[in-house]
Amino acid sequence: MPDSSRQQRRREQTRARLIAAAKNLVAVHGVDGVGLSEITEAADLGAGTFYNYFRSRDDIVEAVVEESIESVGARLDKLTASLSDPAEVFSFSLRHLVRQAVTDPVWGWFVVRLGVAHPKLLAILGPRCARDLRQGVDSGRFTIPDIELATACVFGALLSTLRYTLSRESAAHVEETFAQTMLGMVGVPADEAWDVASRELPDLPGAE
Amino acid sequence: MPDSSRQQRRREQTRARLIAAAKNLVAVHGVDGVGLSEITEAADLGAGTFYNYFRSRDDIVEAVVEESIESVGARLDKLTASLSDPAEVFSFSLRHLVRQAVTDPVWGWFVVRLGVAHPKLLAILGPRCARDLRQGVDSGRFTIPDIELATACVFGALLSTLRYTLSRESAAHVEETFAQTMLGMVGVPADEAWDVASRELPDLPGAE
């Protein structure tokens, strides 16, 4: 039915406008600095429209995190599923996250301003990181005193590195050096860490 | 003159009330979630009074950072000045920062919610961390591909570890395990890292 599909399409466009507005605003002001009225104003929509799509400010921010972080996480899963070296899996994932922030600074600042305290960000990236670290430990490639704490450290180091990268004119080699530093943290010797971190990075597969 | 000293004392008390209110509020809501009216309300002071002490919300937050982070930094400098092993200097500093957050959760959440994006926090902790890392590299104790990036990683890992610690019932051994993990990151072999990280931690000297 053309009418209902047109309506559906319009609904999706409106939702996408709200999502984009919220993402842009959080990237500049942080979650707590953004109110509903700013989101609807930036999306050029009436205040009432918002509630047809989301329940609250936190609800739309969760949706932004879900759509913009989970999608990258899923593509990383696809890329690394066929790799056998846990050090390479870990390194490629970290490098792609840095590259994503450089390529799409709104995405990068959104993640940085969301910060280490946002539970949803950690809920999406944390389990993937812990899984990769565990594989490294199980295969004897990594030496980690506490995987959960190491995951927290990788997560914080990533966000801080994204901020560092986004604040600089040139981000040459940050990708590789960050991966090398994190491989060192999980117990890979310096020369091996550099060897792994400087391998050619395969492209991220497209979203489903 | 007793009158002017009483006035001076009252002025200091009022300023301290504003500082405490701002610190508490930022610890719960983050910088961007706190407005001037909430600070003056929490301090039980008129809105006009605020401007006798601070120019803006960002100004008072800077003052909180200055007073509550710089003071810990200065005490850490005093503690570590006489130590000769850079690994011990680095480890003791990190452990005291974790301990400070556990002992004073408002301080801890203030740091966590300030987040990796706040320039003042990094301006106080960053140069001290970079100095300690450089000493470690110069003495041959640390192997670090890029000191500036490693500083960013330590900073982010610290904030994320504080959040991890503050969100848990029990934080047993987080101090030591975090120091061990960071020592591993800067290239100290696993057994040495544990040896250094588990040494008895001397108390922090009092503030000046």
Image (spheres, coloured by chain):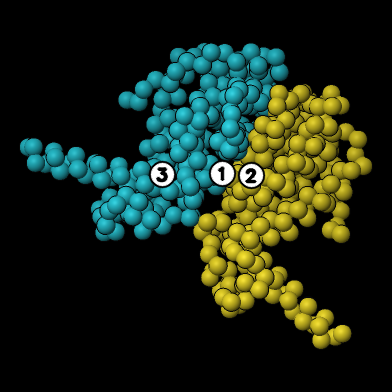
Chain colours: A yellow, B cyan
Q: Position of residue A172 (x, y in %)?
A: 70, 44
Residue A166 visible in the displayed image = no
Q: Mark 2, residues whose alpha carbon is within 10 Å: few (<14), some, or many (≥20)?
A: many
Chain letter for mark 2: A
Q: Which residue is mark 2?
A: A159
Q: Amino acid at mark 1?
A: Val
- Numbered circles on residues, count: 3
Q: Secondary structure at mark 2?
A: helix
Position of residue B170 relative to residue B196, above or below, is: below
Q: Nearer the viewer, residue B138 or B159?
A: B159
Q: What residue is at 62 percent from the left and 76 percent from the top?
A: A49
* Same-chain check, marks 2 and 3: no
Which residue in the rendered view is the most extreme toward the front? Answer: B169
Chain letter for mark 3: B
| Disc ID at residue A45 | none
Q: What residue is at 86 percent from the left and 26 percent from the top?
A: A139
Spatial distance from mark 2 to mark 1, Cα to Cα? 7 Å
Spatial distance from mark 3 to mark 1, Cα to Cα? 17 Å
Instruction: Name the image quarter holding residue B71.
Output: top left
Q: Pointer 2 and pointer 3: residues touching (CB < 8 Å)? A: no
Q: Is residue B202 left or right of residue A159?
A: left
Residue B180 visible in the displayed image = yes
Q: Is residue A166 left or right of residue B51?
A: right
Q: Mark 3, residues whose alpha carbon is within 10 Å: few (<14), some, or many (≥20)?
A: many
Q: Which residue is mark 3?
A: B23
Q: Secondary structure at mark 1?
A: loop
Q: Nearer the viewer, mark 3 or mark 1?
A: 3
| Disc ID at residue B116 | 1
Which residue in the rendered view is the most extreme toward the left? Answer: B1
Choose the circle earlier in sequence order: 3 or 1.
Answer: 3
Q: Nearer the viewer, residue A4 or A31?
A: A4
Q: Pointer 2 and pointer 1: residues touching (CB < 8 Å)? A: yes
